[in-house]
C-alpha cells in the first residue's frame, strides 16, 4: 500500500479519506475494504520517514483537515520503486520441501501430498473462476489480477502433474 | 453408486483393434442427477474414449453402462441412435455444426429427428437462442460466426432435446480466453439449472467449475477431487498476491 499511496500523492495532495477512496477504486474489486486505520498508519509511517508531509487546512465548524503531499524524498523513493523490476516468480517452496523430504525420508506418502495439494489448488482456482464469472465487466485492475492468479494456479497444477510423473 | 444415478458405468474396458494396450482399463463411476463432473488427464489417458463410450458413439470391449437405470451398452445400433438423439447432448471442440444449414436449422434438426413437432422445435430453439444471446444470428450460416458464437450454437443444439446428460469434449479447446469465459458462464448456468454434465478438458480452469474432477491415467481413474464453492474468493486472491506492499 505504501507505494500506491505515494503514487496517488504524486498526482495531487490529498487527505486520508480521499486516499482511501482512490485506493479502493483501484483495488476494491479484488480486496476487502480497508479500514481507515490502515491508511492512517501507513501515512504516519511515511511521514516519519519524510516521504510525505502533512499540513493542516482550517475548516468551518469542523476540526482541521490534514492534507498530505509528497516530499522530494518521497518522489525519489517512488521513482526508485518504479525503476526496479520485480523479482519472481515465487515457487511454492514449502510444498516443494515437503515433497522432497517426504520422498527421501519415507515419512509421508508423496502421492498423497501431491493429491492434497492438487485439491487445494483446484479449490483456489474454483474460487477465482467464480470471482471472474461474477464480475464479467470488472475493472481492468480486477480482471488482470484475477487472470494472473488463475494463470499461476494453472501452472502450479501442471507442475504437480510433472512431479507425479517424475517422482512416483 | 446410487440407484437414482443418471449414468453408471461398471468396469468399462476399451481396447482398440491393433492397439498394444487398452485405452480404458476398468472404469467404474456414477453421476448423480444434476452433477457436473470434469475428466482430466494427460493426452492418451483415455478421457475422450470414455466420453465416446458414455455417449454411445463407440462400443466398450467389456463392462456395463446404465443410463437412467437402463443398460445401454448392449443396445442395437438403431436403438442406440435413437437414445443418442433423445437423451444425450454432445458438444465438441470443433463445434461440428452443419455448414450448409442456418443457425436456426442446426439447432432445430435434432429436435425434429427426435420426433418433436415443428412448432415445439421452433419454440425451444427461439428460447435457447435468446438465453444464449444469439437471437439475431438465427438466419446466418455457422461460418459467419466467431468460434465462441459457434460453440454457443452447438450448446443450444445439444440442449434442445433436454438431454439426461450433456457430454462435452474439450468445449473450450478451440476458443480464446474471452469466449472460454463465456462458455464457462453458460455451462455453469445450465448446471445451476439442474443439467447433469460430464466434460473432458485439459484446462484446469474449465475443470474447476465442476463439482468433481476425475483424473485418468493410462485408462484408469487415478484420483478424484470434490470441489466446494468458496465463501471468500477475495481471501484466496489476497493470499496469492500480497497487495499490501
Image: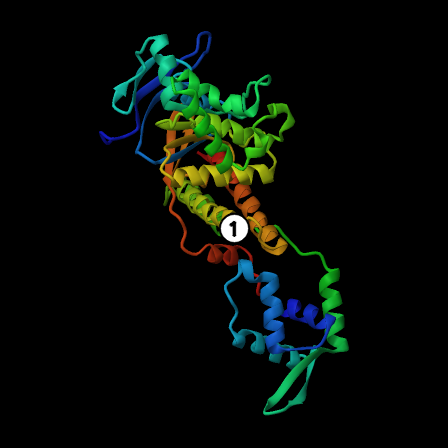
Q: What residue does disc 1 label?
A: A93
Q: Quadrant of the N terminus of chain B?
A: top left
Residue B37: percent from left, percent from top = 39, 34
Q: Residue at x 36, y 13 (%)?
A: B80
The residue under the point 65% across, 81% down is A47
B24 lies left or right of B126: left
| Tag 1 subunit | A
Give left or right: position of A128 versus B141.
left
Q: Is residue B5 left or right of residue B190?
A: left
In terms of depth relative to the viewer, which is nearer, B122 or B187?
A: B122
* Placement of B236 over or under A123, stated as above or below: below
- Placement of B4 over or under A73, stated as above or below: above
Residue B215 sits in which quadrant? top left
Q: Position of residue B97 (x, y in %)?
A: 55, 21
Q: Is residue A20 visible?
A: yes
> In front: B170, or B41?
B170
Residue count near mark 1 (Cα–Cα under 10 Å), binned few <14, some 14–19, many ≥20: few
* Label 1 SS: helix
Residue nearest the viewer, comparing A114 with A166: A114
What kind of colouring is applied to the model shown? rainbow
The residue at the point 49 percent across, 41 percent down is B185
Amino acid at each position: 500500500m505504501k507505494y500506491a499511496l505515494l503514487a496517488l500523492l504524486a498526482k495531487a495532495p490529498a487527505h486520508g479519506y480521499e486516499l482511501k477512496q482512490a485506493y479502493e477504486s483501484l483495488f476494491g474489486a479484488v480486496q476487502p475494504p480497508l479500514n481507515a486505520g490502515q491508511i492512517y498508519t501507513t501515512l504516519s509511517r511515511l511521514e516519519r520517514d519524510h516521504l510525505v508531509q502533512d499540513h493542516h487546512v482550517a475548516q468551518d465548524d469542523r476540526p482541521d483537515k490534514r492534507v498530505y503531499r509528497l516530499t522530494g524524498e518521497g518522489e525519489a523513493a517512488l521513482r526508485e520503486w518504479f525503476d526496479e523490476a520485480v523479482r519472481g516468480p515465487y515457487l511454492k517452496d514449502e510444498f516443494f520441501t515437503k515433497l522432497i523430504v517426504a520422498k527421501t525420508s519415507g515419512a509421508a506418502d508423496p502421492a498423497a501430498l501431491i493429491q492434497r495439494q492438487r485439491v487445494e489448488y483446484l479449490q483456489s482456482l474454483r474460487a477465482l473462476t467464480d470471482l471472474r464469472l461474477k464480475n464479467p465487466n470488472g475493472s481492468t485492475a480486477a480482471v488482470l489480477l484475477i487472470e494472473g492468479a488463475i494463470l499461476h494456479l494453472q501452472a502450479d497444477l501442471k507442475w504437480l502433474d510433472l512431479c507425479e510423473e517424475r517422482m512416483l | 453408486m446410487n440407484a437414482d444415478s443418471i449414468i453408471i458405468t461398471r468396469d468399462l474396458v476399451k481396447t482398440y483393434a491393433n492397439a498394444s494396450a487398452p485405452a480404458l482399463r476398468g472404469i467404474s463411476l456414477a453421476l448423480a442427477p444434476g452433477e457436473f463432473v470434469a475428466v482430466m488427464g494427460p493426452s492418451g489417458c483415455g478421457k475422450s474414449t470414455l466420453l465416446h463410450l458414455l455417449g454411445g458413439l463407440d462400443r466398450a470391449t467389456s463392462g456395463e453402462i446404465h443410463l437412467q437405470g437402463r443398460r445401454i451398452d448392449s443396445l442395437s445400433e438403431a436403438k442406440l441412435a435413437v437414445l443418442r438423439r433423445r437423451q444425450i447432448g454432445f458438444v465438441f471442440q470443433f463445434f461440428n455444426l452443419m455448414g450448409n444449414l442456418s443457425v436456426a436449422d442446426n439447432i432445430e434438426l435434432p429436435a425434429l429427428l427426435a420426433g418433436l413437432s415443428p412448432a415445439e422445435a421452433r419454440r425451444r430453439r427461439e428460447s435457447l437462442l435468446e438465453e444464449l444471446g444469439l437471437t439475431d444470428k438465427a438466419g446466418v450460416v455457422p461460418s459467419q460466426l466467431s468460434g465462441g458464437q459457434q460453440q454457443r450454437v452447438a450448446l443450444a443444439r445439444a440442449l434442445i432435446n433436454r438431454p439426461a446428460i450433456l457430454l462435452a469434449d474439450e468445449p473450450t479447446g478451440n476458443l480464446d480466453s474471452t469466449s472460454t469465459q463465456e462458455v464457462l458462464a453458460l455451462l455453469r448456468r445450465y448446471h445451476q439449472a439442474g443439467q447433469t454434465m460430464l466434460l473432458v478438458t485439459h484446462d484446469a480452469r474449465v475443470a474447476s467449475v465442476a463439482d468433481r474432477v476425475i483424473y485418468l491415467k493410462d485408462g484408469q481413474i487415478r484420483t478424484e477431487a470434490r470441489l466446494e464453492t468458496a465463501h471468500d474468493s477475495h481471501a484466496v486472491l489476497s493470499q496469492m498476491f500480497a497487495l499490501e506492499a
